Amino acid sequence: MEGLHHDTIVDGEEGDPPTKEQVAPVAEDKIDEARDEDFSNKPINRDLTPDERVNLYEQMVRIRRFEERSLRAYQQGHIGGFLHLYIGQEAVAVGSVSALAEDDHVITAYRDHGHALAVGMNMDECMAELYGKKTGCSKGKGGSMHFFAPDKNFWGGHGIVGGQTPLGLGIAYALKFNKKTGACLCFMGDGATNQGPFYESLNLASLWNLPVIYVIENNGYSMGTAEARHSAGEPLARRGTAFDVAWSVSHGHDVYEVRHTINEALERAHKESRPSVLEIITYRYRGHSVADPDQTYRSKEEIEEYKNRKDPINLFKDKLISEGHLNVETAIEIDQRAKEEAAGSADFAQASPLPEPEELMDDIYWETDNPADKTSEGTMFFETP
C-alpha cells in the first residue's frame, strides 16, 4: 500500500532517529481510504491480459475447492494429523506468487496448501501427501504441513511456528551469494511475529542487506486468540522499524492489491537487495486447524459478515465481470472444473500405495553428512562442487 512503508532510512538524514510521528501506527482512516482504491490500474496489473486475469481467478477457485475436498476427506477418516485450511486467504498466495520472477523463491509455514497450488503443484501430488501416500509430493512422509517442490522454487511447509523465518533468510543469503537477482518470499502468520527467530532474522536481513520479504498473513486470530490479546502494538509490520526494514500494511481480499504490494517489495529486493515486512490483512473461514472447534473466540456472525463483504473469490469474480473479462457462465464452468479436479485428486490419493517400511530412512539429512553412502537423488539448495 503506497505511502505506508518506511524506507531504510525513515524520512530523515542518514543516522537521524525517526520521530514519534514517523513510527506511529498506521492511521485507521488511511487504511480505510486504501480499501476504496482501484489497484487494477497499478503498473503490475494494468498490462494483464484478459486470460491472465481469469487465470488468477481460476487459481483461487481451485485452491478453495481443493481445501473443501480435503476437509471432506479428513472427516471421512482418510487424513490423519493436522489439516490447516487456507479457505478465505486465497488471494494472498495467488496474488503473491503471480508477481514472482524466475529467481524468486517461496517458503511458508504449515498452512501451505494454497501456496503449493499457486506455485504450480498439482492436486494429485498434494492430496496424496495429505493421505500419507507414496505418490505424494513428500512421498507421504510430510503430510499437510510439509508440501515441497524444489523444482518450482517452493521450499515448504514448516510446522514450527516462526521456524521458516531464518530458513527464508538463508535462501535470500544464497541468492545474494550466488549473485542472482531474486528474492525469497517468506510467509508467516500473525502469531509467528512474536517468535524470537523472526527478530533475529530481521536483524541479519537488515545488517547484511538480504532480499527477503516477510509476508505476515494476518488472519486475526493466531491459533485462536485475537490479535489484540496476543500482540502489543499495531500494526504488526511496524516491528520492522526497529531494524530499519521497510514495511507496509495492505489487504488480502483484493488480488490486485496483493500483486501491487508484493511487486513494490520485489523491486526493493531486486534493485537494492533490501528486506521488507508486509502485513496483509486476511481472514480464515475455518479454525486454526480442523481439530479447532472455533466456537470460543469468534462468532458465526463475524465469519458470515466477512464472507458476504470481503470474500476474495466473489469480489474478484464481480470485478472481472464488471471489467468485461468474465461472464457468469464461464465462472460456473471454472468452478465445476475445479470441483472435478479436486474430486479426482481424492480418487487418485485413495488408489495410491502407502510408502514401504524400508523407505523410512530415505531422503534424510544423514546422507548429506555421509555422501559416500548417499542413495537418494536429492541435492542441497544451491549446492556447489
Image: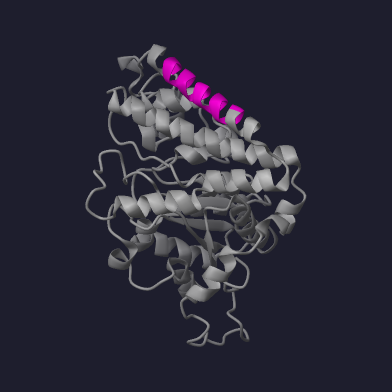
Does residue 12 appear left or right of residue 291 in this picture?
Answer: right
Q: Residue at point 63% right, 44% down?
A: 98
Asked if residue 246 can be seen in this view, the reply is no
- Count of marks overlaid on the render: 0
Q: Which residues are magenta?
A: 333-348
Residue 106 inside the magenta-drawn segment: no
Q: Can you tell which quarter of the image residue 326 is in?
A: top right
Q: Position of residue 64 (x, y in %)?
A: 47, 36
Quadrant location, the C terminus: top right
Asked whether, in this view, residue 359 is left or right of residue 182, the answer is left
Where the N terminus falls, by quadrant?
Answer: bottom right
Vertical comparison of 158 with 128: above or below: below
x and y percent of residue 131 in the render?
36, 23
**Prevailing secondary structure class for the magenta stretch in the rendered image:** helix
Question: Which residue is rendered at x = 63% and y = 53% of the image?
Answer: 256
Camera-side residue of 13 and 227: 227
Q: Does the image show residue 150?
A: yes
Residue 211, image quadrant:
bottom right
Residue at (49, 53) in percent of width and height: 310
Closer to the camera in the image, 224 or 176: 224
Rendered image coloring scheme: one colour
Look at the image and say whether residue 337 sits in the magenta stretch: yes
Choose between 336 and 100: the one closer to the eye: 336
Residue 77 position in % (x across, y down): 27, 23
Position of residue 149 in the picture relative to residue 133 (left or right): right
Q: Position of residue 233 (x, y in %)?
A: 37, 73
